[in-house]
Image (cartoon, rainbow, N blue to C red):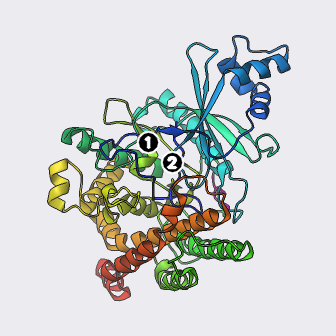
Amino acid sequence: MSRGHHSFVLYNTYVVQAPQSTKMSSNGQQTTEIRNSIDALNLSAWMVRQPSLTKLLFDSEHMVNVQDASEQLRRNLDIRQFGFGQSNPTYLLKISNVDPEVKLVLRRKPNKIAHPSSHALHREYRALESITKYNRQAESNEDFHKTIPIPHPYVYCKDPSVIGSEFYLMKFVEGRVFVDPRMTSISSHDRIEAFRDAIRVLVNIHNFPWRQAGLENYGGQRQGGGGGSNDGSRPTYVQRQLERLLQVTSKQSEMMKTSNATNANNEVDMPELERTLREIARILSEHAGRVPNRLGLLHGDYKIDNLIYHPTLPKVVAVLDWELSTIGDRYCDIANLCMMYFMPEIEKGWGVAGLGDMTNKDLRSLGIPSRMQLLSVYSQIDDCYNGRSTSAETSLKIIQEWSGFYLSFLFFKNCVIVHGVAQRAALGVASSKSAHRVASLLPSMVTVTYKILDELPPPSLSAISHEVNSKL
């Protein structure tokens, strides 16, 4: 795998650090000197004791002298930090005394966290383990088209005394990470295929057999029902998320106040923005109980720069950043991917990579699907995956009708995440070197959220009732 990641922050972030050169759109595996310190000696001593790493690190499967092995690993261990990542510091580990050279990725929790539900690396690791087992089974059945490309997870460390916080190690996947969804370094033909493959992989994720994989309780709450439709007997996924997001916002505000920290941007009226966030949550809550609520494995932060593409082919070879994964409403993932259509281009200087300044004609000339085309392709691939031939029009209509609501919900979530970036920047514990710039985006994010709510409202109750009655 590779790349520090996550995007907006409670968890993650749709905001990314602008690359050094906007001419390069696939430099998402760039690294820097270590910004968040790590105890390499302790890490080496821990690594040589892990059975899952022995074959990777040494010629023999059993090391006789652990101290010698630890010292040898430390001498040959080079650590760099990925330039991306507002949430969890992520490092590239190169071990040079083996042939071929071993590359691993270390993902760790920050030393200070605002809320227990944030920075859930254990959840990310569990998802990677479950998908790895599923992929093996799918491949043995020759269902290669159903596999979900991910980095191979090696080992998780719960002991914070090793490097100061929990962490895990996984395989480094060589490839291209496009920090700009325009993918300017490839041809229009490859761009068409690259977007289609991203949508195909998302459909595979949503059709992952989570019950057979033992993930009924994944995400903290037991999921009931069958296909995930909303029968009103229990809170929907979005309802639960709104409640949790408000708790996180409250905790983040508290930490900033008690620490006597200053805002990353002195011109931001943080108390007023926090009141606005609560008002947006109130509006969303009025509709959250009647959403489609189609349950499936949810990635939680699915977007182009969380994908690794093959070094030369327009094919996804790994999906990154599973920290927000859960059993939830799959339409949230679709909306998360569609946020790029409302974000400005990277040249705007925000450090944000989006398509918001492009017309449908511009997109078509580049081989990039419009938002409505993306929804249509998702619906078609999902129906094909499940062998449905008659429901495509119905499922597409539902996705289209609710797309604005899910978009505004996802933008609200990312407002909370950027609020978290501001909190960590104020405390001096942000993992990304562009944290202050990201935090300054909060007013604009709030504005966009309101605009989407106004221009793309959810279907009215009367319209839904009419549609239901017409089918009776």
Residue 165: x, y in percent?
A: 75, 48
The answer to whether one can see residue 207 in this image is no
- State the residue lying farthest toward the bottom: 462
Q: Is residue 218 magenta?
A: yes
Q: Amino acid at mark 2?
A: Phe
Can residue 417 be seen here? The reply is: yes
Name the residue tied to disc 1.
28
- Please state the horizontal and vertical placement of residue 126, each as a whole percent of the image: 65, 45
Disc 2 to disc 1: CB gap under 8 Å? yes
Magenta segment main secondary structure: loop
- Please identify the quarter of the rendering in which residue 190 is found: top left
Tell me which segment is drawn in magenta: 215-220
Q: Quadrant of the C terminus?
A: bottom left
23 left or right of 173? left
Residue at image position (49%, 56%) is 301
> Of label 2 and label 1, which has the lower sequence position?
1
Residue behind mark 2: 84
> 294 left or right of 126?
left
> Who's the residue at 33% across and 53% down the image?
383
